[in-house]
Amino acid sequence: MSDRQLLVSKIENGIVIDHIPAGKAFLVLKLLRLDPSARVLIALNVDSRRLGVKDIVKVEGSYLTSREIELIALVAPNATLNIIEGWKIKEKRPIGVPEVVRGVFTCPNPLCPTNSKYSPPRPIFRVEAGDRIEALRLHCKDCGSTLYYGSIIEQIDRGTISLEGGGLVSKGKIERVFLDLLLRKGALRLPPSAREPFILKSGRPSPYFINLGVLTDGESLATLKWAFASYIALLLEQGEIEDFEYIFGPSYKGISLAALACEGLNELYGMDKRYMYDRKEEKAYGDTSADRVIVGAGFFKPGQRILVVDDTITTGATKMDTFEKLKLLGPHKVVGLVVAVDRQERMGDAERVEEKGAAEYIEEEMGVKVYSIQNVEGIYRIIKDSLDEEMRRLWIEYYAKYGTTTLE
Ligand code: ZN
């Protein structure tokens, strides 16, 4: 392997941003606002056939959203994005200058409505690209003011740009922020001792209890919105799920999650999806029209695609009801199921333990893949060092008996 190849491919999983103009690597890093624990490799002034010299930035274990890719184009318009999986380049993507930038920068005109103190509209800039990077300009759609290249760089450099909780969203970051929320708000509870486990609806004596119903304050909702939207954007970026037109949230817990996810996708990632939910009280849905059972169905066109979101998967059966109701819409495709937490348990009750887990059941019965923001492995990994020996044994034994995964 030549030195050239080595420089580009020597990470296991993540991204390599290549062909950054020399000296601009640190600006790219500032734009990405990386998680402090992210593993980053930077190469400066590397020989390049195309540019003479160039910079390279590699980020381990991370992916970029399309919005972030567009922003990189403002400082490194001819850069290439390499997506690395298993030490190999899985995909090479040129980074193109966007036509429009939403948010991020501040309009230079202090009298612009976007700079008003009370609920200003988000600034939207039309991008004017020149033949040289320095000729790049942003024009404010509200007042027509121009933001020149120097000011763009200055705003990035000063760190006054706003990515609204964006930055490089890795799965690890989403998991950590989400688990932190569960713990701080009391949505994840541990029993007082190993002898007093929580008895679940299934009758199983659980070493923990998760209740997303306590996440009703504004801060929790903002974090839920960020976590769901960022995870869905990540799944789309990685090609894990197909693009879709609707987010469906089964009543009652799924309704607010679907609404938050839609809003977050629009605000943070510029995507416009609609949400739908079902009415629980409508019993005789077999012979009524779809929009009497499913709110939002009036917009649905045959063949459109739906992502389902929910808080958790307890039994596969409740999710099967959801898929049954969706049939009222006529021809459609469910592209995936995104849940906040997967308990990773086998179906059944305290005595009866079936072979399959709920996620596996849904995948096999419906052909719908299940994705979770957090699961019990992630939760246990973080909290296990704070558990005493007896409590740890409770977790391990519980999962040995009921789990689709084993803990140690
Ligand atoms: Zn303006």
Image (cartoon, rainbow, N blue to C red):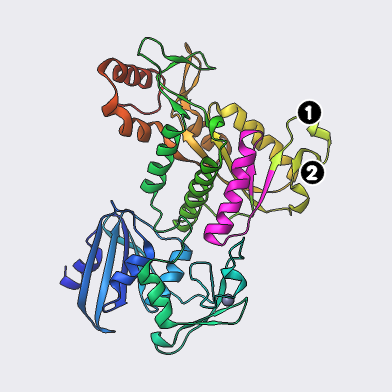
Which residue is at a point 65% across and 39% down the rendered structure image?
255
Residue 335 percent across, percent down from the top left: 57, 48
Amino acid residing under circle 2: Asp
Q: Is residue 232 rendered magenta in the image?
A: no
Write down the region rendered in magenta.
247-276
Residue 386 percent across, percent down from the top left: 28, 26
Displayed quadrant of residue 276: top right
Observer-nearest residue: 19 or 389?
Answer: 389
Residue 94 in sight from this viewpoint: no
Q: Ligand 1, what quadrant? A: bottom right
Which residue is at a point 33% across and 26% down the rendered structure image?
406
Amino acid residing under circle 1: Lys
Give the numbered dot on residue 283.
1
Name the secondary structure under disc 2. helix
Give the numbered dot on residue 362.
none
Relative to 94, is 208 above or below? above
First reached walking from the N terminus: tag 1 or tag 2: 1
Cα separation between marks 1 and 2 = 14 Å
Q: Which residue lies under the disc numbered 2?
A: 291
Name the secondary structure under disc 1. loop
| Dot 1 alpha-carbon crowd within 10 angstroms: few under 14, some 14 to 19, many 20 or more | few
Label 2 lies in ligand 1 vicinity (Cβ under 8 Å)? no
Displayed quadrant of residue 201: top right
Which quadrant, please, contains the N terminus?
A: bottom left
Relative to 269, is 200 above or below? above
Relative to 119, is 198 above or below? above
Residue 343 percent across, percent down from the top left: 45, 29
